[in-house]
Amino acid sequence: MRDFKSFLAPLMREFVIFQKVSERWNESYDISLSRFDKHCQKQYPAACELTQEMVDTWCCQRETEINNSCITRIYAIVGLVRYLRKRGKTTVKEPIIPRKEPSVYIPHSFTHDELKKFFAVCDKAADNAKTEKQRLRHITIAVFFRLLYSSGVRTNEARKLRRKDVDLSHGILDIQSSKGYAQHYVVLHDSMTSLLRQYDAAMSKQYPKRTYFFPARNDSYHINKWVQNNFRRIWIQCSDGYATAYELRHNYAVENINNWIGEGFGFHKKLLYLSRSMGHSVLESTKYYYSLVPCLADILEAQTDDTMIPEVDYESF
């Protein structure tokens, strides 16, 4: 937790603790709250309570900001104000959140060769590790990205998975920490369940009492930067194109939708299942992927494979 210094410091710490205990914390909130804290400290050094002017001057959209950037910058402050209002600690009104703009970014369309190279690089790092701990760290990366690819879970959902959230007997993930905080379940492919069992057995030898399925230091979960840095490090060895780890989720949706084309009424039924599995609260969110589906002639050859995840063999693991 950052060291807040304005008059709001005690209330901010209280808010942060509440968010973390409620499992609603987002790493980006830390930066936003810190910057708002500095704003209050610099502009209102003698203040002893939150005012509408403080919130409005910080949360108003800047000339250089697009709507989505403004939302990212102020959302933690909106949450703070809501928290304080519900507890009778302020009468300040919530700032108006700009209307979200549709993204113009087109996600990368992975090819079979790119994915094959990507996971080969993941496995090579594990094979070349010099110590057991290094090997487990590289295996964690390889298994983590295979989970994203084969299940469509969000990166933050996978990062924050606890051991108790993973049912290895039935191959089911209990997604507690999700976008919008909506709990949902994800049924894994048998091949992914088998891989997670091997991984869990190996990690349990080194970290028998770990809380998180993919553990970081101090019995915590990995931060988003861990995902970004590792994906980028591996991806640049596979392709000159731009891609992010989150696009493995897009790929999962596209491959499923491509497989269902021509099934008539069965298509709509499976789309609903896909929507629930991906944690969408409304079907319209899943329909967005229609715009990402490539032409029928470009359906990935990997669709004919018996397994949904690339082959992996770590022997003793």
Image (tube, rainbow, N blue to C red):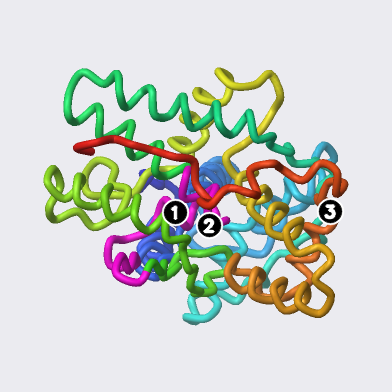
**Residue 196 placement, left or right of 207:** right
User: Residue 158, which numbered label?
Assistant: 1
Q: Residues within 10 Å of mark 1 (few under 14, many from 20)?
A: many
Look at 19% across and 37% down and name the residue there: 316
Instruction: Say what secondary structure mark 3 lies in.
Output: loop
**Residue 191 placement, left or right of 181:** left
Q: x, y percentage for residue 130? A: 21, 18
Q: Nearer the viewer, residue 68 or 216?
A: 216
Nearer the observer, disc 2 or disc 3?
2
**Between discs 1 and 2, the one toward the N terminus:** 2
Residue at the spot of label 3 = 102
Instruction: Say what secondary structure mark 1 lies in.
Output: helix
Look at 53% across and 52% down and name the residue there: 306
Q: Residue 297: which quarter of the image?
A: top right
**Between discs 1 and 3, the one toward the N terminus:** 3
Instruction: Say what secondary structure mark 2 lies in.
Output: helix
Amino acid tagged 3: Pro
Q: Residues within 10 Å of mark 3 (few under 14, many from 20)?
A: few
Q: Nearer the viewer, residue 233 or 89?
A: 233
* Quarter placement of the C terminus: top left
Numbered range of the magenta stretch: 146-170
Q: Nearer the viewer, residue 260 or 144?
A: 260
Nearer the observer, disc 1 or disc 3?
1
Circles 2 and 3, Cβ within 8 Å, touching? The answer is: no
Amino acid tagged 2: Ser
Residue at the spot of label 2 = 151
Look at 41% across and 60% down and name the residue there: 16
Q: x, y percentage for residue 153? A: 53, 57
Question: How much space separates mark 1 and mark 3, taking CA atoms?
Answer: 25 Å
Amino acid tagged 1: Ala
Q: Is residue 276 above or below residue 2?
A: below
